[in-house]
């Protein structure tokens, strides 16, 4: 046996025994599910009578003030009013008065609903009463968190900072502070890092220097920095992760201002022109801009909804952040921002005790009476994780950092008088948001348990819910979308929350037990390729389990009695509401399951539908046509004259006339099938020099105004129809492969 193999065997023999296999846990869960199913199917006397024990013996009496009318016109009146208001919102302009009207309706319908809910608790047994109260508390807390977010919409003014930036651009010839552009990196793909450096060099601002902050200590990155003539910093250790990396740069640079970009973000050419002017005000410490992405979220991509639905973070960056800006409560997001050096030095640099540094450092600035402003303009574009597992690790790390902030005690005294009442209220709102996994678990599990074991969580017939519940539900789903300028859809938010629910609940428990422990990955993987479909069973099995249990329960309760009288189950009050709720949850679980099936990613570069007149030059001949799409690595080209196909072979040169760009190319393929009467030609770029490389990056990423740079919007109704379509059309299962 060779020495390396002997060493490897000795190391393996000294390792502790393997932990319990995930398959063993899966077998345990399956066994428990079989046991529950056996109880459901045995028709034991105690189980048959369970609905009698756990539900009210008689229909409870409502107070006289809550009695609903028998006349259909009056019974449906609240629902018709809510529907009319939602229809009015399709044409109603955004204005503080119209927002006030919508909020008043939400408040009235909400109070009406929750007062009725207090009289719809299941008091038949202490077990069912406990479940019913917990369900009501979760529902109340969830709605309260929504109202806290939407009440300040009365002063929502998303264009205020843009107008201010317009006014300040005129004085930049007099106010020109030095700017150090930092690109912190660890182990990312050198191609991605190089692209970001080139984009930063295209920023229209003379008094700037670019620094690559390499925590990976890689010679190839140093070589790229030297080739592109930018500064390279690599510290002797990696203590405190990204925060330590930034603090090292803070001590080794001397600029007035600091612009920070993660290595997968590319700033637009006017980034500094739009942000620098705010620092004329000596009280401003930091200017944050939105995070926007050139590729689709993993769930949009897997569901076949690329470039259709808004990114799941659009609501935060284009509604919550501008709203917080009104009260000096903006959250620093770690990239695409400019900071004042003196402010960072005054608060002791970047905060190092938490797993992330951005939100905590911004909090330190607010606690020291600095102002943090938010410019609601897309001024950079980045890459969102391509796979569910990478997306999950990123969001869990963000959640852990948020929770750690509330465990920082005297170091970050967010409940002290150093913050205003509104600032503390926003921190309280975020604290409620951190409990979302717990509330979502209640929303998923309690209706299922109610349905399986035959007890109700809302002791009321459907007609009561039609009068009290449905009008409020329609309003809170439709009106919140309108209040958030169509950046937010509650039903899609429920999909995101359900996808994140169980991993987030596990991480929440871990962090509460050990707030400053290290869990999961510290860096998000970007730009990864994968030739196979990922089913992510270890993350999506809860959705499968829910669908199996609900389907079996439905069959045993409603289909089995048709086959044998021994399977008769006692009906219970509120059963109709529970079955409707479970059908809705089943639809969400289906969407979550399909969203978690990652499609293959075989292309290293994202393709964009960039159409422009161009020509292929082959042996001195010019073959005219139009590009159909463009990427960093190549293009799809359609010839104007089909007869020119016989002249294309080997190497050629693509000339984009309007852009004055010439790129040597290899002809990779010619499509066999004609599209719109033309066959497409696949071209591979052979970038000749840095100038051509920068020009291509400018065309795809740095120029503002391209449609894939714009924030996506859709109507609330269209978003809901897309949700139904995603549940009924298993795109992720049926698609054989995907090149995106």
Image (cartoon, rainbow, N blue to C red):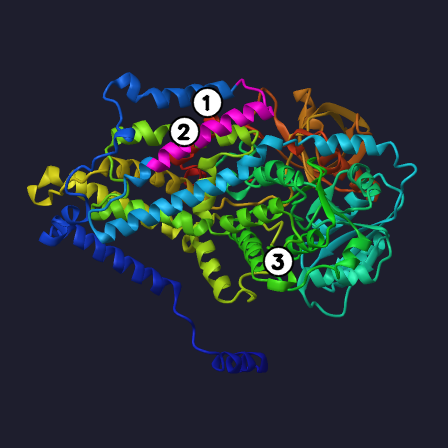
Residue at 62% in and 49% down: 527
Q: Nearer the viewer, residue 636 or 101?
A: 101
Mark 1, residue position: 86
Q: Position of residue 722 (x, y in %)?
A: 45, 30
Closer to the N terminus: mark 2 or mark 3? Answer: 2
Q: Position of residue 492 (x, y in %)?
A: 47, 37
Closer to the N terminus: mark 1 or mark 2? Answer: 1
Of the two numbered discs 2 and 3 in the rendering, the one whose residue sits closer to the viewer: 2
Q: Position of residue 281 (x, y in %)?
A: 82, 42
The answer to whether residue 724 is above or below residue 360 is above
Closer to the N terminus: mark 1 or mark 3? Answer: 1
User: To which quarter of the image does residue 77 belong?
Assistant: top left
What is the distance, in whole Å, between disc 2 and disc 3 at their CAs?
Answer: 40 Å
221 within the magenta span: no
Q: Is the Cβ of the residue at disc 1 closer than 8 Å to that at disc 2? A: yes
Residue at 17% in and 54% down: 39
What is the distance, in whole Å, between disc 1 and disc 3 at their CAs?
Answer: 43 Å
114 within the magenta span: yes
Of the two numbered discs 1 and 3 in the rendering, the one whose residue sits closer to the viewer: 1
Mark 3, residue position: 523
**What's the magenta region?**
91-115
User: To which quarter of the image does residue 136 belong?
Assistant: top left
User: To which quarter of the image does residue 344 belong?
Assistant: bottom right
The residue sitting at the right extreme is: 174
Quadrant containing the C terminus is: top right
Mark 2, residue position: 474
Mark 1: few/some/many CA within 10 Å (<14, 14-19, 20+):
many
Residue 149: numbered disc:
none
Mark 2: few/some/many CA within 10 Å (<14, 14-19, 20+):
some
């Amino acid at each position: 046996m060779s020495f390396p193999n002997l060493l490897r065997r000795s190391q393996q023999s000294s390792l502790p025994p393997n932990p319990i296999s995930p398959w063993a846990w899966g077998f345990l869960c399956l066994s428990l599910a079989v046991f529950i199913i056996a109880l459901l199917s045995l028709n034991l006397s105690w189980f048959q009578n369970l609905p009698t024990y756990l539900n009210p013996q008689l229909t409870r009496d409502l107070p006289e003030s809550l009695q609903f009318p028998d006349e259909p016109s009056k019974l449906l009146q609240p629902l018709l009013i809510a529907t009319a208001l939602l229809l009015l919102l399709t044409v109603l302009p955004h204005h503080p008065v119209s927002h006030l009207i919508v909020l008043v309706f939400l408040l009235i319908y909400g109070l009406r609903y929750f007062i009725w809910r207090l009289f719809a608790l299941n008091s038949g047994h202490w077990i069912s009463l406990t479940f019913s109260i917990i369900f009501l508390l979760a529902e109340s807390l969830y709605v309260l968190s929504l109202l806290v977010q939407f009440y300040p919409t009365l002063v929502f003014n998303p264009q205020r900072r843009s107008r201010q930036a317009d006014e300040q651009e005129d004085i930049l010839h007099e106010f020109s502070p030095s700017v150090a552009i930092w690109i912190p990196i660890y182990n990312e793909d050198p191609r991605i890092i190089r692209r970001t450096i080139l984009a930063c060099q295209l920023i229209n601002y003379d008094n700037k220097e670019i620094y690559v902050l390499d925590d990976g200590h890689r010679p190839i990155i140093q070589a790229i920095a030297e080739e592109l003539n930018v500064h390279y910093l690599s510290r002797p250790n990696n203590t405190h992760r990204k925060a330590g990396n930034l603090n090292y740069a803070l001590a080794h640079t001397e600029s007035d201002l600091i612009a920070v970009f993660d290595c997968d973000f590319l700033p637009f050419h006017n980034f500094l022109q739009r942000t620098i002017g705010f620092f004329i005000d000596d009280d401003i410490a930091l200017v944050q801009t939105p995070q926007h992405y050139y590729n689709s979220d993993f769930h949009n991509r897997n569901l076949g909804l690329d470039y259709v639905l808004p990114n799941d973070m659009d609501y935060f960056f284009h509604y919550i952040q501008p709203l917080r800006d009104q009260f000096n409560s903006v959250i620093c997001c770690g990239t695409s921002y400019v900071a004042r050096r003196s402010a960072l030095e005054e608060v002791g640099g970047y905060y190092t005790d938490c797993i992330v540094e951005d939100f905590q450092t911004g909090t330190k600035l607010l606690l020291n009476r600095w102002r943090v402003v938010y410019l609601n303009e897309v001024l950079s574009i980045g890459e969102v994780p391509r796979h569910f597992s990478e997306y999950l690790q990123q969001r869990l790390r963000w959640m852990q950092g948020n929770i750690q902030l509330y465990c920082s005690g005297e170091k970050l005294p967010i409940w002290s008088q150093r913050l205003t009442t509104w600032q503390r209220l926003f921190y309280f709102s975020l604290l409620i948001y951190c409990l979302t996994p717990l509330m979502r678990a209640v929303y998923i599990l309690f209706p299922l348990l109610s349905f399986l074991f035959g007890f109700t969580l809302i002791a009321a017939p459907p007609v009561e819910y039609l009068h009290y519940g449905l009008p409020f539900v329609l309003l809170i789903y439709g009106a919140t979308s309108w209040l958030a300028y169509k950046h937010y859809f509650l039903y899609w938010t429920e999909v995101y929350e359900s996808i994140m629910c169980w991993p987030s609940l596990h991480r929440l428990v871990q962090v509460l037990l050990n707030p400053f422990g290290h869990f999961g990955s510290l860096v998000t993987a970007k730009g990864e390729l994968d030739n196979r479909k990922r089913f992510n069973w270890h993350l999506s099995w809860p959705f499968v389990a829910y669908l199996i249990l609900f389907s079996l329960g439905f069959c045993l309760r409603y289909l089995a009695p048709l086959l044998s009288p021994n399977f008769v189950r006692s009906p219970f009050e509120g059963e109709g509401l529970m079955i409707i709720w479970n059908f809705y949850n089943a639809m969400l679980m289906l969407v979550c399951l399909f969203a978690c099936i990652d499609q293959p990613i075989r292309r290293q570069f994202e393709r964009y539908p960039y159409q422009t007149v161009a020509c292929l030059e082959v042996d001195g001949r010019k073959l005219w046509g139009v590009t159909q799409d463009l990427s960093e690595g190549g293009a799809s080209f359609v010839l104007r004259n089909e007869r020119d196909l016989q002249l294309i072979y080997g190497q050629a040169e693509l000339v984009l006339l309007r852009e004055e760009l010439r790129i040597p190319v290899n002809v990779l393929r010619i499509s066999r099938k004609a599209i719109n009467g033309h066959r497409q030609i696949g071209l591979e770029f052979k970038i000749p020099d840095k100038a051509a490389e920068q020009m291509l990056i400018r065309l795809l990423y740095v120029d503002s105004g391209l449609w894939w740079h714009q924030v996506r919007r859709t109507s609330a109704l269209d978003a809901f129809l897309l949700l139904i379509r995603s549940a009924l059309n298993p795109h992720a299962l049926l698609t054989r492969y995907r090149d995106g």
